[in-house]
Amino acid sequence: MGMAFGVLIVQAGLEWWWGPVFAAVIFAGSLEFLVLGLVTATAPLATIAGTAFLVNFRHAFYALSFPLHRVQGRGRRAYSTFALTDEAWALTSSSVAQGWSSRRIFALQSTFHLAWVSSVTVGGLAGNLIPDSVVGLDFAMSAFFLVLALEAFVVRRSAPLPIVALVCSLVSHLLFGDGMLPAAMGSFIFLVILDFYARRRRA
């Protein structure tokens, strides 16, 4: 996925070295794909900031179960906060991970960061070798989240949430067109909260 993003950087008309810059400074895969499109379309800074907030707002919930209290040192804590990705959260949110050492958590996150920057760099350097006729690389992030959704369904066997998310997306697209993202995410979160309190009352 990082290599696909590096190739997209070059195909968007930017120099290859912008890939590692995006990867190192932003370090949020889905957001990087979106920001690339916004930057090449010369979108206003407010639009980019709003998109970043909506896409990465989930990290506020990740922080509730991330073992930041195990990370020692202000510098390492600041980096752990910055490098809190979906993958890092998935590995550290378990009860076992709550006892991991500061060194292990820091090594995990820095390894993810280095791997992402390296793969984006390779993709950027190889981007000039791939003809413009090759299409579909911008779908890498969508395919990634689709696979995650399928895996989550296999593990939890819960069909309602994906169906609710799909319905929220379709209805929001019909009502708001290209501005569907805030409405889709807002309505989905609202329904998830309602479902949570309904389950809690039944329990």
Image: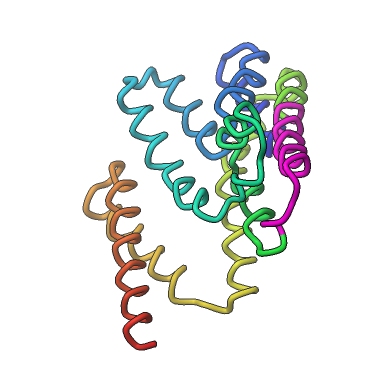
Q: Quadrant of residue 129?
A: top right
Depth check, front residue: 136 or 90: 90
Quadrant position of the C terminus in the picture: bottom left
Residue for point 31% across, 42% down: 178
Task: Give the number of marks.
Answer: 0
| Residue 169 appears left or right of 23 | left
**Magenta segment: does it hold 155?**
no
Depth check, front residue: 171 or 193: 193
Q: Is 49 drawn above or below residue 103 in the view shown?
A: above
Q: Is 50 drawn above or below residue 140 in the view shown?
A: above
**Magenta segment: does it hold 107?**
yes
Residue 61 at x, y = what percent?
Answer: 46, 52
Its colouring scheme is rainbow
Residue 103 at x, y = what percent?
Answer: 77, 39
| Residue 201 appears left or right of 158 | left
Magenta span of residues: 97-119
Residue for point 30% across, 71% down: 194
Q: Residue furthest bottom?
A: 202
Residue 171 at x, y = what percent?
Answer: 28, 60
Depth check, front residue: 80 or 198: 80
Quadrant position of the N terminus in the picture: top right
- Magenta span main SS: helix
| Residue 144 appears left or right of 167 | right
Residue for point 36% across, 28% down: 49
Q: Residue furthest left?
A: 175
Residue 130 at x, y = what percent?
Answer: 73, 25
